[in-house]
Amino acid sequence: MENKKLIVLEGISGAGKSTNIQLLTSNERKIDGINIKISKLMENIEKTNYIDYTNTKYFLLLENLKTILYEDSKKNFVLFERYYLSTLAHVYAMSILNNDKKIYKDILEWYQNNIGNTIKKPNAYIFFNVPIEVSMQRIKKRNESVVNDIWIERQYMQLCEEYKRSFINQYEKDVKIFNIDATRSILEVYNEVLEIIKNI
């Protein structure tokens, strides 16, 4: 499909990305929502109690799989909950927290070698903006276990979100950026996201 658009929903845990992808996919005929998660991918790969989330090969496998699913979609709009930007941000944050610059250098080289090939640059990013305190409250209210505790640590989340803006400004200035206040009601956020999508 020539005019198919790829839109990535970004934001910290608990911002409402999954909820909105489910709503948009259920209610809008022309939208395909893809929100497979690294934890779900790993459940299907390894039936063990230990998963090495520092091994970026798992994340890269997920990004390649998402790209294939985008290419196969017959809808006008394909929404991803996170994409390679989140993987880059994750590795960047871990490189800072573990004082290991090489892991980030390697992942950046992977991006530069694969963008436009095994991974596709999005048409737009939609950032779901919520304060970290709100994110924590929502995660606690859901009463769900978090597979990797680092994902909900304040410093990690701050590093990831700061990195994403910096990366786009440096490497992807041609991609449209939309920021929404995700502290509002589910319906208000849904309506704004839908309006953004229709105008991309």
Image: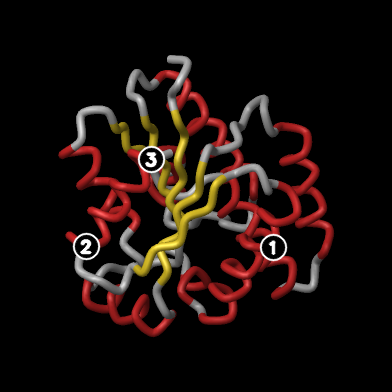
Q: Quadrant of residue 54?
A: bottom right
Instruction: Please name the residue shown 38% across and 22% down the image.
Output: 73
What residue type is disc 1 on?
A: Ser
- Identify residue for label 1: 166
Label 1 vs label 3, nearer the camera: 3
The amino acid type of the residue labelled 3 equals Asn
Dot 2 crowding, Cα within 10 Å, few <14, some 14–19, many 20+: few
| Residue 58 vertical placement versus 100 (above, below) | above
The residue that label 2 is drawn on is: 188
Q: Residue at x 59, y 32 (%)?
A: 120
Query: Residue 199 — which label?
Result: 3
Dot 1 and dot 3 residues touching (CB under 8 Å):
no
The answer to which of marks 1 and 2 sits earlier in the sequence is 1
The Cα–Cα distance between marks 2 and 3, rounded to whole angstroms, is 17 Å
Label 1: which secondary element: helix
Name the residue located 30 percent from the left edge and 47 percent from the top edge.
195
Position of 19 with respect to 13 (left or right) is left
How is the rendered protein coloured?
Answer: secondary structure
Task: State which quadrant residue 24 falls in.
Answer: top left
Of residues 99 and 160, the one drawn nearer to the viewer in this rendering: 160
Q: Position of residue 7 (x, y in %)?
A: 45, 41
Of the numbered discs 2 and 3, the one sitting upstream in the chain is 2
Please indicate whether residue 196 sits to the left or right of residue 12 in the image: left
- Residue 104 percent coordinates (x, y): 76, 57
Residue located 66% across and 65% down the image: 163
* Mark in front: 1 vs 2: 2
